Amino acid sequence: MKSLAIIVALSWVATGSGWANGGEHFPFHVGEKLTYQIFWGPFVAGRATLEVDGIEQVDGHDCYHLIAKASTVGLADLLFHVDSKTESWLDVALLFTRRYRESRTEGKHVRADETRYDYEGKLAYTTNFVTGKVRTAPLDGPVQDVVSSVYYVRTRPLALNLEENFLINVGDTNYTVNVRPDLRKSLSVRPLGDVSALRIEPHPTLTIVAANKGRMWFWISDDQRRLPLVVASDMKIGSAKFVLFKIEPATSADANRRRDETATRDH
């Protein structure tokens, strides 16, 4: 079922971009977990989450460990089971990706790979854990992956018609992506009620969206939280939408960890 594969692909991309901002003023922190309902047309087809799980070291650098999950539910799961876990390690100080890992099942198809970014050697190495093959891509500067980009864009002072460009790596290919908020309006989402939001349509879009003559939009809250509220795509084969359903704030223990993060960055 190609349509459900699209749903999983959409869960990875969500907004896609990145920039730097000031440490403790980040709109996200360890312990934040965002849950989304996935709609295919009018039907709930799955559930997705975005989570800042903790801080881990990659090649001696402190990184936010980011986890994105998506899975089918109900009838959609009976028709075509999809289960996806995608991880990213985003440099705490510099806000670019240092490692990316994905594991997903779509029906009988299984994919598992990992990309490591060697910025000193100017190469990205992607290992396919199923076949054992390794692909490389040149690195001329810092890049984002499809998960880190969600958080990277949240640190930006987005504004209507303000254009930004960033580099995103997908396996052995680097893409220059352009984003420019083109509309502001109020959206109603369950955990927040009415909230002002900015709409972004990144260019280029997902290959599978373009191949189906579609377009994709991201709605981000126009406040200090920069929450990804909705991801929507219309294609000739149908429409898919991710809608923010639940926000889990950090616990007191996570708040202590956040203070530790700030102390780490300051040393």
Image: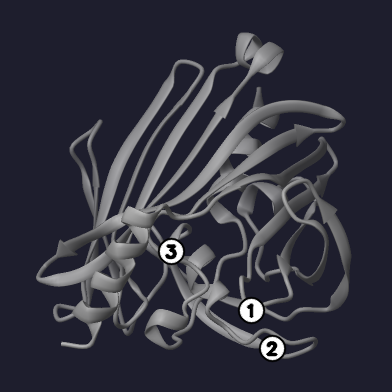
Number of labels in the image equals: 3
Where residue 72 appears, as percent x and y from the top left, is: 60, 24
Which is nearer the N-term, disc 1 or disc 2? 2
Horizontal side of residue 171 vs 125, given as left or right: right
> As displayed, is residue 249 above or below residue 262?
above
In the rendered structure, are the residues bearing label 2 and label 3 in contact, judged by CB atoms less than 8 Å apart? no
Which is nearer the N-term, disc 3 or disc 1? 3
The residue shown at (70%, 50%) is: 209
Which is nearer the N-term, disc 2 or disc 3? 3
Which tag is nearer the camera, tag 2 or tag 3?
A: 3
Where residue 43 appears, as percent x and y from the top left, is: 81, 26
The residue shown at (30%, 74%) is: 92
In the rendered structure, are the residues bearing label 1 and label 2 in contact, judged by CB atoms less than 8 Å apart? yes
Does residue 171 appear anywhere in the picture? no
Residue type highlighted by circle 2: Glu
Please state, as top left, top right, bottom left or bottom right, where the N terminus lies in the image. top right
Horizontal side of residue 130 vs 27, given as left or right: left
The residue tagged 3 is 148
- The label number, if any, that marks residue 19 in the structure image: none
Horizontal side of residue 215 vs 2, given as left or right: right
- Kindly indicate the quadrant of the structure image that contains residue 267: bottom left
The residue tagged 2 is 163
Q: Identify the secondary structure beneath mark 1.
A: strand
Where residue 156 appears, as percent x and y from the top left, is: 57, 83
Where residue 66 appears, as percent x and y from the top left, is: 38, 55
The residue shown at (45%, 50%) is: 51
Residue type highlighted by circle 3: Ser
